[in-house]
Amino acid sequence: MTVKQLTRIAMMGCILQIVFGMFSDILYLECITLTIVLFALSFDIKEAFLAAIVFGIMNMALKQGVSVWSMMYCVIYPTYTLILGSIKKTCLKHLWLTVIVCGVLSFLTGQLLEIPFLLVSKTVTIYYILLGLKTSLIQGVVASISCAFLFRPLHEILMKINH
């Protein structure tokens, strides 16, 4: 791996941490998934994958501490980059698909983060998922709208940086 690649991975990880920190206290406005989508569709998938892992580690070290829930970020976002990498060409051809995928992934984030409650109880997990459903739905819609307006201009900027 080159110094340029390592630097790009570190910068993407830092940007993810900044975006997460800036918007995590604003209900329904979840921009980390849009940023993951942007990085996965604008850069090499290996770099985006590693940046998502760097973000997860930094999030545990700087913001949330080490817990089962914070470890979920080390699983969810790298998985999202792999999913996006597998449909990258199609997403780049069709903005509508990118918008839908971004919304679905944003919705799923809220739901997948509830999985560790299975360690407590199956019933508790079901309650948390059901109680978080409204928030996750709104979050997914807001992420889709954000993606519809911001993806193309931000992707063009990232492509200039990439080359």
Image: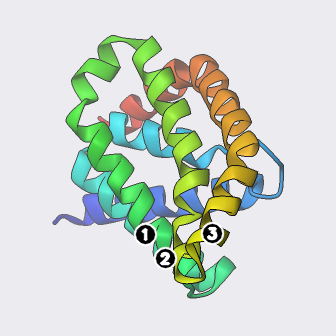
Residue under pointer 3: 123
Is 30 in front, or is 105?
Answer: 105
The quarter in which the N terminus is drawn is: bottom left
Residue 122: give x, y in percent of width and height: 56, 71
The quarter in which the C terminus is drawn is: top left
Residue under pointer 2: 71
Q: Are marks 1 and 3 in contact (CB under 8 Å)?
A: no
Tell me if mark 3 has few (under 14), some (14-19) or many (20+) residues whose alpha carbon lies within 10 angstroms of its own: few
Q: Residue 74: give its label.
A: 1
| Eye-nearest disc, 1 or 3 | 3
Q: Residue at x 70, y 30 (%)?
A: 142
Give the residue furthest to the front: 123
Q: Are marks 1 and 2 in contact (CB under 8 Å)?
A: yes
Q: Are marks 3 and 2 in contact (CB under 8 Å)?
A: no
Tell me if mark 2 has few (under 14), some (14-19) or many (20+) residues whose alpha carbon lies within 10 angstroms of its own: some
Is 148 in front, or is 47?
Answer: 148
State how far apart marks 3 and 2 are (Cα).
22 Å
Q: Earlier in the sequence, mark 3 or mark 2?
A: 2
